[in-house]
Amino acid sequence: MKKLNLAVYWAAACGGCDIAIVELGEHLLELAEVADIVFWPCAMDFKYKDVEEMADGHIDVTLFNGAIRTNEDAHIAHLLRKKSKVLVALGSCAMEGCIPSLGNIKGPDHALNRAMKEAPGTHNPQGVVPQAAYEMPEGTLTLPTLCNQVRTLEQVVPVDYKIPGCPPNHEQIWKAMTQIIENKLPPAGSLLGVDERTVCDQCPREREGKIRVERFYRPHEIIPDPERCLLEQGIICAGPATHAGCGALCIEANMPCRGCYGPPDGVVDQGAALLDAIVAGFEGESDAQIRKVLDTIVDPVGTFYRFSLADSFLHRAKMSEELSGRPCASQADGDGRQEMTT
Amino acid sequence: MIRADELDNTFVQEIMNEPGGEDILTCWSCGTCAATCLVRRYDPSFNPRLILYKAGLGLRDEVLSSAEIWQCSACDACYSRCPKDIHISDVMKAIRNIAIREGYEPPGPFAEVDEEVCSGCAVCTRACPYEAIDRITKNVNGTERAVAQVDKNLCLHCGVCVAACPSGAMSLETVNDKEIVSRVGAGGWLDKGSYLAGEAKEPHLLVFVCQWSIHSDTEWNRMDALQSDNVRIVNLPCSGRVDPQIILMALTEGADGVLVVGCKEGECHYTRGTYLGRSKVALLRTILDQMGMPQERVRFVELGSLDRYVLPRLIDSMSQDIKQLVAAPVQVCG
């Protein structure tokens, strides 16, 4: 049998998804028997021109992790789409924006300003902000520029499959890989590497079912009972509104589910679904009591949309203009100004 | 025709022995309850006075088998007006309890659980104002796992659980998400372009109205007149049924604002539904604010039982407020 050509790429990501692939361990040897890795910048030495020189459709499967934050990310997304038969969004960033897309709350200009000028420990008296192009005696230096929004992979190019998780559970990655290797893929557009229903289905904790809470605690404010449902102890747990697949890992560590496996089947806006589920457990028979409970929820966008902001109705409602890849205003004109497409 | 030999003289005593049924014999049959009853708006055949009267006569089988005893949703609008201080919803409950023991079943509709989809997360059991939902462990297609189970005798079909369920496992005929979304978008209403995007001359407002918050029948019957290209009114069984996902969808697809109309504090037909409705809207407003979007695009207003013809003014005022937003346009990042 002809070996598969496999590519792995990271865009705006933390590297956790690549680590999750490394965590396949011995399975990597099995993988090496059936597939050639033709591109994996995080782990092996490849250059973009290696990909550019490939024939269209040369790569059988690309696992693309990371959100689209810079014009370089967008450029490689277009490039890999062209060169790949199957494009898989691996992990929460590529699938739904994840933590990087929380940057959309205030936008990239705010982020740049914060990182380059305001952050404690930053010494930048001249207020230098990275520029797309800079003239030096030796020639022009260029850097990628931030787009004015962090987008999901699918908001930039068509995607065939998605594997959720931050990062995806390595066993689930292998399950998906097996489907790819054995050519037993479900219809395009499906999620790979997930289980049925939500995290609560895999959570072993005791749920009394009728307990409502008078206030919410942040994880550092309370040591929860490891046997009881976290929501019933006043800790916002995203389990009810999160697709199963992780095996309730965080919950085993006595931490609430934060929702990295994305919305359950049929739900578009994970944050709104979670909001509804959380409000349902409010104690209070008057406006004043309910307000008191509400006031204990800190950073609602970061709590309810921690992983899914870029792909949510909320984000789309904010973007009255079409989701665009225009660069942010703080960065000067230059060659990198326009979104590069191949 | 009522035949004397069909009357069961012990029935009244049976009801009076049941908790809540003690006061049935003090009823004068004045009909104030029927005149007040909000359920009659949807089913004119429902008449609390008549049920109490028939029960008093001893028409046991007729009362226990009637569909009407299940329709009272215990809003207690009649309780405050009854000159004899009869807690009619309690009497109804007493009659229902007897009916349940006799093997009669309520006609529905009820909240239904799709056990294939249900994760047993217990969100609905916390949401239900009537404790009508339990989390039980049972065998579903060969796997032993926890799922929600609705007690049909307690469910008063408010739809709060359908909104609360984060995985879409809960449904209730006529107020499912699909049904509501299709009512929101019927006739291409969402495609008419939005005011804030500069595509329309007047703001487009989506108004969710709790069906119990409008107390005047005449006003209720004239609600359709408020509908226009700019205003879309969608009735819900309770403001607690409002779904933030649908609100955000409407804002994404072309509505400039969403107004949620619910009952006044302490007057909710479904005890705590209005608190859920207003909490969701309040939290959503905080979220919009954090995102740098104007909070005014989503609003909760309450209507008291004495308010009449207030809705047109509320709609107009929200519309005016949205017009002000043009001066401070939606902040788009970058």
Image (tube, coloured by chain):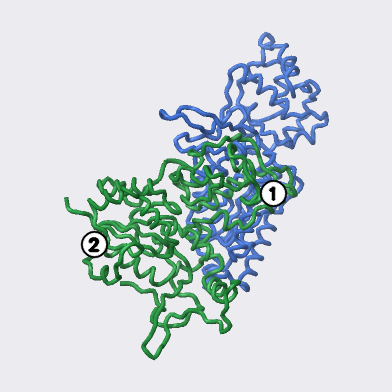
Tags 1 and 2 on a common chain: yes
Q: In blue, which chain? A: B
Q: Is residue B284 above or below residue B156?
A: below
Q: In green, which chain? A: A
- Quadrant assignment, res A125: bottom right
Residue drawn 24% across and 54% down?
A35
- Quadrant assignment, res A326: bottom left
Q: Is residue B201 above or below residue A135?
A: above
Q: Is residue B159 visible?
A: no
Looking at numbered disc 1 in the image, what kind of residue is underneath it? Val
Local secondary structure at mark 2:
loop
| Residue ID for mark 2 | A57
x, y percent for residue A140: 38, 85
Residue drawn 58% across and 58% down?
A301
Extreme residue toward the top, this view? B5
Looking at numbered disc 2 in the image, what kind of residue is underneath it? Gly
x, y percent for residue B40: 66, 35
x, y percent for residue A262: 47, 51
Q: Is residue A204 left or right of residue A188?
A: right
Residue drawn 45% across and 71% down?
A147
| Residue ID for mark 1 | A293
Q: Is residue A224 above or below residue B298?
A: above
Using the image, name the chain to which the residue with label 1 belongs: A
Q: Nearer the viewer, residue B106 or A130?
A: A130
Crowd class of label 2 (few under 14; some 14 to 19; many from 20; radius 10 Å): some
x, y percent for residue B231: 59, 58
Give the quarter of the figure containing the C terminus of chain A. Answer: bottom left
